[in-house]
Image (cartoon, rainbow, N blue to C red):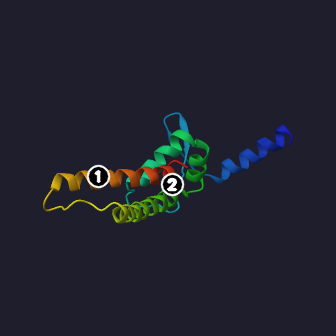
């Protein structure tokens, strides 16, 4: 594409957008089409951090296509369900001690199972 036609296309796009003046700069008026107000959970925030640090191209693509929040919500809900499923499976194969007789052993056992389940979810969903 020749330089003059490229500049003409850029001007056309600039004319279609509206701008606001901030000091010496013109900032485009860009708004999200579907702003979400529901807060992200633990796993959604972890996924966002992973994408920002390890896959910035995918992160930017999701932001620009306005699919980031729905992606993070889906990951968060899926991770919560998966942790719950894994916890029940782990409890079936490795039952917890009696909570009334030995509370500290029960808490230690449940924390260990939850850590194992979360590690599996981190590998499967968050860091992939």
Q: So how many labels did they put on this image?
A: 2
User: Which of the image's four quarters has the N terminus?
Assistant: top right
N-terminal of the pair, mark 1 or mark 2, is 1
| Camera-side residue of 91 and 53 | 91
Q: Residue at x 48, y 48 (%)?
A: 48
Against 43, is 74 above or below?
below
Which residue is identified by label 1? 111
Q: The residue tagged with tag 2: helix, strand or loop?
A: helix
Q: The residue tagged with tag 1: helix, strand or loop?
A: helix
Coordinates of residue 115 in the picture (x, y in percent): 36, 50
Which residue is identified by label 2? 125
Coordinates of residue 23 in the picture (x, y in percent): 49, 35
Coordinates of residue 81 in the picture (x, y in percent): 42, 65
Coordinates of residue 106 in the picture (x, y in percent): 22, 56
Q: Residue furthest top?
A: 24
Q: Residues within 10 Å of mark 2 (few under 14, many from 20)?
A: some
Q: Quadrant of residue 7?
A: top right
| Camera-side residue of 1 and 39 | 39
Against 107, is 11 above or below?
above
Q: Residues within 10 Å of mark 1 (few under 14, many from 20)?
A: few
Of labels 1 and 2, the one closer to you: 1
Using the numbered discs, state the Cα–Cα distance from disc 1 to disc 2 in whole angstroms. Answer: 20 Å
| Camera-side residue of 4 and 118 | 118
Residue 13's disc is: none
């Amino acid at each position: 594409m020749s330089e003059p036609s490229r500049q003409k296309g850029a001007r056309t796009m600039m004319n279609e957008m509206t701008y606001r003046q901030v000091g010496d700069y013109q900032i485009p008026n860009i708004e999200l089409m579907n702003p979400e107000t529901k807060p992200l959970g633990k796993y959604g925030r972890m996924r966002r951090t992973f994408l920002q640090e390890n896959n910035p191209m995918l992160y930017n693509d999701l932001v620009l296509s306005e699919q980031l929040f729905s992606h993070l919500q889906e990951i968060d809900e899926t991770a919560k369900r998966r942790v719950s499923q894994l916890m029940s499976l782990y409890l079936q194969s490795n039952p917890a001690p009696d909570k009334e007789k030995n509370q500290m052993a029960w808490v230690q056992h449940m924390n260990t199972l939850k850590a194992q389940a979360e590690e599996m979810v981190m590998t499967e969903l968050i860091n992939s």
